[in-house]
């Protein structure tokens, strides 16, 4: 039985980079490429960043119950096809899903044992700086992304693990520890000392252990939200 790993984060939190590095470090981990009805941007290629399809085709897939999850985001559909889970199970691999909080809730409803990880930026100011410096969006879009981030972050307590992406190398190692730890715990095998170290490293990021550490980050978004009201 494959383990499904869900990773969610506000736009600009560095999730895509973390996912890319994790896939290099951990074998036996299939990655689901989402379907979308939006147009490709820049150098994006069909089947690499997304499967780009027409709205009619996406809605036909919905009618045929071909999605594990899907959502309409800013007027475009995004979704994860069920076939990726079937294919991962056939290969004996686990499945990694890079999806938003709406999609994560849908997958958790269908697969309660899925392991969910929420990636947080170090704070609102840092997120705004990252969004501005990557140069992909207008000021209006960045403002909208920050508002969306504030809403998404309020869902942090629905996730099993919380990972603050402050220092990339450390965050990558922590994410790897979470995946390996869950694999070991699901295997039922006795753990070596190295295995136990990985479990301890992962446990630091469990929701129940992360509250004090992430509270200042949550407050930084809530203060700004109150200030705009």
Image (cartoon, rainbow, N blue to C red):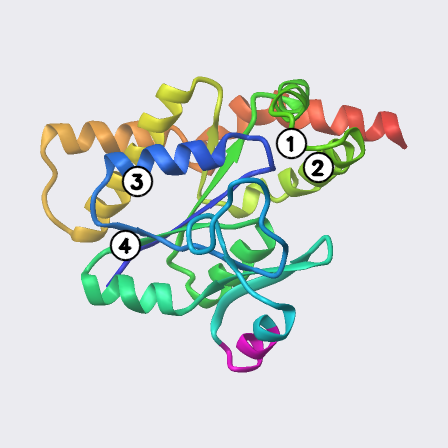
Q: On screen, 21 above or below 216?
A: below
- The answer to whether residue 212 is left or right of residue 206 is right
Q: Secondary structure at mark 3?
A: helix
Q: Are marks 1 and 4 in contact (CB under 8 Å)?
A: no
Which of labels 1 and 2 is toward the front?
1
Residue under pointer 2: 145
Q: How many angstroms separate mark 3 from mark 4 (CA)?
A: 11 Å
Instruction: Tell me where the magenta segment starts and ends, as one range.
Output: 59-65
C-alpha gap between disc 1 and disc 2: 12 Å
Q: Secondary structure at mark 1?
A: loop
Left-right relation of 57 to 143 = left
Disc 4 designates what residue? 94
Task: Answer whether residue 161 is visible to the viewer in this image.
Answer: yes
* Residue placed furthest toward the bottom: 64
Q: Is residue 208 visible?
A: no
Which residue is at the front of the view, 103 or 30? 30
Q: Please tell me how crowded label 2 is: few (under 14), some (14-19), or many (20+) other residues with Cα within 10 Å.
A: some
Q: Earlier in the sequence, mark 4 or mark 2?
A: 4
Instruction: State which tag comes first along the sequence, 3 or 1.
Output: 3
Q: Earlier in the sequence, mark 3 or mark 2?
A: 3
Residue 54 screen position, x and y as percent: 61, 68
Where does label 3 land, which residue? 23
Residue 126 at x, y percent in the picture: 62, 19
Q: Which residue is mark 1?
A: 136
Q: CA–CA distance between discs 1 and 4? A: 32 Å
Q: Residues within 10 Å of mark 4 (few under 14, many from 20)?
A: many
Which residue is located at x 60 percent, y 25 percent?
134
Q: Position of residue 57 (x, y in %)?
A: 57, 74
Looking at marks 3 and 4 on the same chain, the residue that comes earlier in the sequence is marked by 3
The N terminus lies in quadrant: bottom left
């Amino acid at each position: 039985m494959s383990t499904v790993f869900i990773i969610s984060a506000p736009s600009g939190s560095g999730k895509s980079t973390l996912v890319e590095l994790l896939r290099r470090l951990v074998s036996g981990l299939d990655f689901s490429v989402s379907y979308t009805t939006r147009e490709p941007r820049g150098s994006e290629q069909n089947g690499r960043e997304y499967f780009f399809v027409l709205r009619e085709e996406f809605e036909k897939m919905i009618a045929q119950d071909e999605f594990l999850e899907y959502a309409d985001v800013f007027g475009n559909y995004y979704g994860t096809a069920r076939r990726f889970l079937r294919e991962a199970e056939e290969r004996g691999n686990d499945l990694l899903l890079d999806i938003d909080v709406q999609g994560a809730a849908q997958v958790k409803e269908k697969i309660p044992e899925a392991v969910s990880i929420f990636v947080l930026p170090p704070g609102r100011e840092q997120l705004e700086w990252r969004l501005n410096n990557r140069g992909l969006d207008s000021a209006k879009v960045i403002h909208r992304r920050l508002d969306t981030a504030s809403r998404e972050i309020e869902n942090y307590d629905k996730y099993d693990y919380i990972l603050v992406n402050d220092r990339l190398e450390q965050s990558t190692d922590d994410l790897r520890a979470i995946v390996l730890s869950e694999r070991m715990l699901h295997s039922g095998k006795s753990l070596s000392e190295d295995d136990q170290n990985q479990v301890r490293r992962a446990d630091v990021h469990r929701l129940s252990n992360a509250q004090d550490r992430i509270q200042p980050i949550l407050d930084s978004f809530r203060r700004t939200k109150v200030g705009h009201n």
